[in-house]
């Protein structure tokens, strides 16, 4: 099975359909290379200050820099890209809401071996989610071109429907090669891993991921972004970060207050809504 490739004119429904079928898809040239160059320039001080990983999984020649919303205006734009949010909304429509899960710039250095092939949803204590119930929609933006030689992400298309705890060799995977400014979508259940960098240059990618809002975020957005900076962000981004009540009754503050109202110091409607309303939203999403 080949990795599906879609044009930048694709819809969120097109991307979600490919993800449901194959577990992965690439949208080529979604943004101009200059956008990726701008993001890299904004992040460069933090990229250079980040220490390499401490084990084989994180990569001893790989730098993983988080906190991107606080550090890059361009990354804030990419997190809210309309096509990405439309695809996430469609793929995760079986949940009442979703939230930002992780922001990370990944620089794979020359000589880094391939990463263990894994599922991202194993981060949730290796919980065996029901087959077909997706809890994550992930993206990797190509800050630099991705090639098989420089460590392009390796995928097993269709493996989001495979059994759990499987092991794959890299020769059983496909390289997600793509031009700068393209974006790879993949689900939390897809088996994948970073490729080996056999080139003499660093491969940079932006890993921006989303998950259903009843699961804990991998990156703590409330501490990654200082509250005084968060108050300057658009409300839509704040809610995506997690400043919102999720599911029926998750994430409220003291007397059922909306966390966004608390952050912004304003009065608001403290009501959760009815359980019937929440169930109706779930039924509508599953239809």
Image (cartoon, helix red, strand yellow):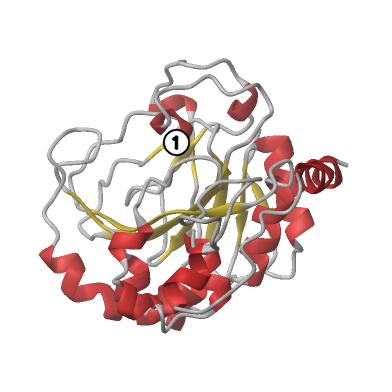
Residue placed under numbered mark 1 in the picture: 120
Residue 221 lies left or right of residue 24; in this view the side is: left
Q: Residues within 10 Å of mark 1 (few under 14, many from 20)?
A: some
Up/down of 104 relative to 167, above or below: below
Outermost residue to the front:
255
Q: Residue at x 43, y 30 (%)?
A: 124
Observer able to see residue 105: yes
The one nearer the camera, 167 or 49, is: 49
Q: Residue at x 37, y 70 (%)?
A: 69
x then y, percent, for residue 259:
49, 63
x then y, percent, for residue 17:
77, 46
Residue 69 lies left or right of residue 155; in this view the side is: left
Quadrant containing the N terminus in the rendered view: top right
Q: Residue at x 51, y 69 (%)?
A: 260
Observer able to see residue 31: no
The one nearer the camera, 217 or 27, is: 217
x then y, percent, for residue 7:
70, 65
């Amino acid at each position: 099975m080949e990795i599906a490739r879609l044009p930048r004119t694709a819809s969120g429904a097109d991307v979600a359909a490919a993800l449901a079928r194959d577990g992965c898809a690439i949208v080529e040239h979604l943004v101009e290379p200059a956008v990726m160059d701008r993001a890299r320039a904004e992040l460069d001080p933090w990229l250079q200050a980040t220490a390499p990983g401490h084990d084989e999984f994180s990569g001893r020649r790989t730098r993983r820099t988080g906190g991107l919303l606080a550090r890059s205006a361009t990354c804030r734009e990419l997190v809210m890209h309309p096509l990405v949010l439309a695809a996430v909304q469609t793929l995760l429509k079986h949940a009442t809401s979703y939230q930002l899960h992780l922001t990370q710039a990944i620089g794979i250095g020359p000589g880094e071996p391939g990463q263990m092939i894994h599922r991202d949803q194993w981060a949730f204590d290796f919980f065996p989610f029901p087959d077909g119930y997706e809890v994550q929609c992930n993206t990797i933006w190509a800050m630099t071109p991705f090639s098989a030689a420089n460590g392009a992400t390796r995928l097993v298309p269709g493996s989001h429907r495979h059994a759990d705890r499987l092991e794959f060799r890299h020769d059983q995977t496909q390289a997600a090669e793509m031009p700068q400014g393209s974006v790879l979508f993949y689900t939390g259940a897809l088996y994948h891993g970073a490729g080996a960098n056999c080139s003499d240059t660093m491969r940079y990618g932006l890993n921006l991921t989303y998950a259903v809002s009843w699961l804990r975020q991998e990156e703590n957005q409330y501490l990654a972004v200082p509250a005084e900076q968060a108050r300057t962000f658009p409300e839509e981004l704040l809610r995506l970060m997690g400043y919102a009540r999720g599911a029926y009754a998750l994430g409220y503050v003291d007397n059922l207050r909306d966390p966004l109202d608390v952050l912004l110091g304003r009065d608001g409607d403290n009501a959760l809504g009815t359980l019937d309303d929440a169930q109706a939203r779930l039924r509508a999403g599953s239809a």
